[in-house]
Amino acid sequence: MPSNQPPLGALPARFRRERLLIIGCGDVGVRVVRAQRHVRVLALTSNSARVAELRALGVTPLLGDLDQPATLKRLAGLATRVIHLAPPPLRGSTDPRTQALTRALSVRTPPRSWVYGSTSGVFGDCAGAWVSDSRPVNPATPRAMRRVDAEARQRHYARLRGNAVRVSVLRIPGIYAPDREGGTPRERLLRGAPVLQRADDVFTNHIHADDLARACQLALWRGKTQRAYNVNDDSSLLMGDYFDMAAGLYGLPKPPRISRAQAQVDVPAMQLSFMSESRRMLNTRMKRELRLQLRYADAKAGLASSPTINRT
């Protein structure tokens, strides 16, 4: 469809400033905002209570709801860059929210680049194998299937425009940060939640929220068309070893170890799903193409950055 808006370069100088639209401006989105320079930032929110908070950050809030497509019409042609961090709904195998967003942004001038925060869960269980950026997806849960659907919709959006929109998909594992709500294993350790015994344990992957925000920012400018990136640190830890390490940092007892058979009885279904997939993610493209230099090379360094860590 022909655009009824002039290209950015044809606008008066005061309108040529890059405009970044963040969809899903939660903890990571706010970290992205704080890293911006010389870019006007807009953020979609369905919560009117967040308007003042976003304005205080220098963000232009836009009220709209991904579950109500009619409220998204004003997004068309607003942004030159998009970061999409909003999760899919909790049910189904598709992502109608991403469908609504791509339809809304199909009118008028499309953005130049689009970054999507997906999940490493799209790879499914890899039995502890090393997972490259180019490994085919193999989702095993509805949660992962919804993410695969969202990835496909955004890539289709770009293909319809001759890949003039550079869509970058970030495959993200467990996000942590000492200053992130629920962003450390401390509460789980205090509850005494169990982990798997070593014979049954799975490899887990991590990324500090600050490093993830920097990856999102870099992908806007350096991400290649139709490219997927594993965004994780250099850790290679079994899940139980991760919690043992954290327990040592916090001065807390190590979690109890149980068999997989016992976990299927005692562990909640959501938590059990994370204990059922094992993979070690390679971050080659993140370092080579996005040129991200990790501030926290592994989870121990990131968790140890907290001022509340017991250093005795």
Image (cartoon, rainbow, N blue to C red):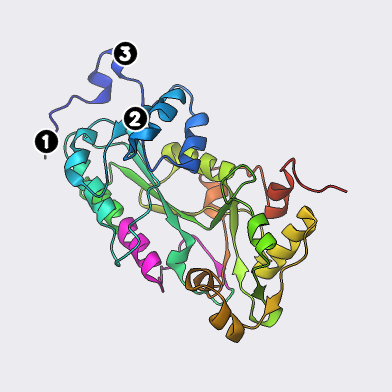
Say whether disc 3 or disc 1 marks the residue closer to the N-terminus. Answer: 1
Which residue is at 40% across, 65% downward?
Answer: 144
Q: Which residues are magenta?
A: 129-151
Q: Can you say whether 162 is above or below 187 in the image?
A: above
Which of the two marks, 3 or 1, is nearer to us in this view?
A: 3
Residue reaching furthest bottom?
Answer: 261
> Would you say residue 125 sits in the magenta stretch?
no
Tell me residue 226's x, y (percent): 35, 52
Instruction: Give 264 or 162, whichever is nearer the viewer.
Output: 264
Q: Of circles 1 and 2, which is in front?
A: 2
Give the residue number, with chain letter if any, for mark 2.
Answer: 61
Mark 3 is on which residue type?
Arg
Q: CA distance from mark 1 to mark 2?
A: 28 Å
Q: Amino acid at mark 1?
A: Pro
Asked which quadrant contains residue 234, the reply is bottom right
Residue of label 1: 2
Would you name the residue on which mark 3 appears?
14
